[in-house]
Amino acid sequence: MKSLVLLLFVAGASARVFERCQWARLLKASGMDGYRGVSLANWVCLTKHESNFNTSSVNHNRDKSTDYGIFQINSRWWCNDTQTPTANGCSIPCSALLTDNVDTAINCAKRVVRDPSGIAAWVAWRKYCKGQDVSSYIQGCGL
Ligand SMILES: *[C@@H]1O[C@H](CO)[C@@H](O)[C@H](O)[C@H]1NC(C)=O
Ligand SMILES: *[C@@H]1O[C@H](CO)[C@@H](O)[C@H](O)[C@H]1NC(C)=O
């Protein structure tokens, strides 16, 4: 099982850092603009401050859980990293959130925002985007 986990990480090792407008276009094409009432600019603001648009971002939390990928999705609630006891709400290995194919991460972010706390589940959104004029995050993208 250890080798399987290692394999998953190696297979998903190709990281990707998006350019702002490229990421905004991809989010829009994935149906994120207005998803659960969250505007495209808010999604771009959230991911800017969570990961700097870097799919290989990994950050450890004080409660021993870990946040993965461009949306910094948490291993206690949404994915399984075999380290944290998890509800695995997105039914995925956390490593799937680190690949250059962001479809899994976007689908999981949609699942997260469908929860009652919605977009406020993301600390960086509360800290840097909530109540702010976030229009600059999609400015010049032609969207
Ligand atoms: C993306 O994140 C990875 C993992 O933290 C890091 O090694 C890499 O340097 C980052 N890339 C950029 C362009 O910041
Ligand atoms: C997480 O993955 C491990 C290894 O595949 C598995 O043994 C475990 O049951 C999984 N946990 C959950 C909650 O899905």
Image (cartoon, rainbow, N blue to C red):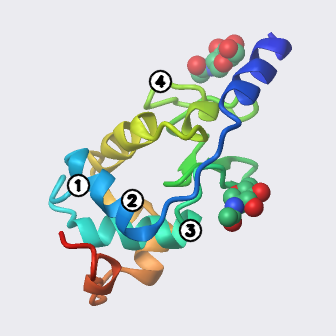
Disc 3 target residue: 52
Who comes first in sequence, dot 3 or dot 1? 1
Above or below, 24 relative to 96: below
Front of the two marks 2 and 4: 2
Residue 13 drawn at (x, y percent): 71, 36
Check the picture and name the quadrant holding the C terminus. Answer: bottom left
Q: Of label 2 and label 1, which has the lower sequence position?
A: 2
Q: Secondary structure at mark 3?
A: loop
Front of the two marks 3 and 2: 2
Instruction: Tell me, yes or no, whether the two marked residues, 4 and 3, touch with CB atoms within 8 Å.
Output: no
Check mark 3 vs ligand 1: CB closer than 8 Å? yes or no. Answer: yes
Mark-to-mark CA distance, 4 and 1: 24 Å
Q: Nearer the viewer, mark 4 or mark 3?
A: 3
Spatial CA distance of label 3 from label 2 is: 11 Å
* 125 displayed left or right of 111: right
Callouts 4 and 1 close, C-beta under 8 Å: no
- State the CA–CA distance, disc 2 to disc 1: 9 Å
Q: Amino acid at mark 4?
A: Ser
Residue at the spot x=39%, y=36% of the render?
103
Q: Is residue 82 visible?
A: no
Dot 4 crowding, Cα within 10 Å, few <14, some 14–19, many 20+: few
- Looking at the image, the residue that sits furthest to the bottom is 133
Residue tagged 2: 23
User: Residue 68 bears which disc, if any?
Assistant: none
**Amino acid bearing label 1:** Lys
Q: Earlier in the sequence, mark 3 or mark 2?
A: 2
Disc 4 to disc 3, how far (Cα)?
25 Å
Q: Which of 101 and 91 lies nearest the eye of the viewer?
A: 101
Question: Which residue lies at the image location 27% right of the left edge and 51% below the top edge?
Answer: 116
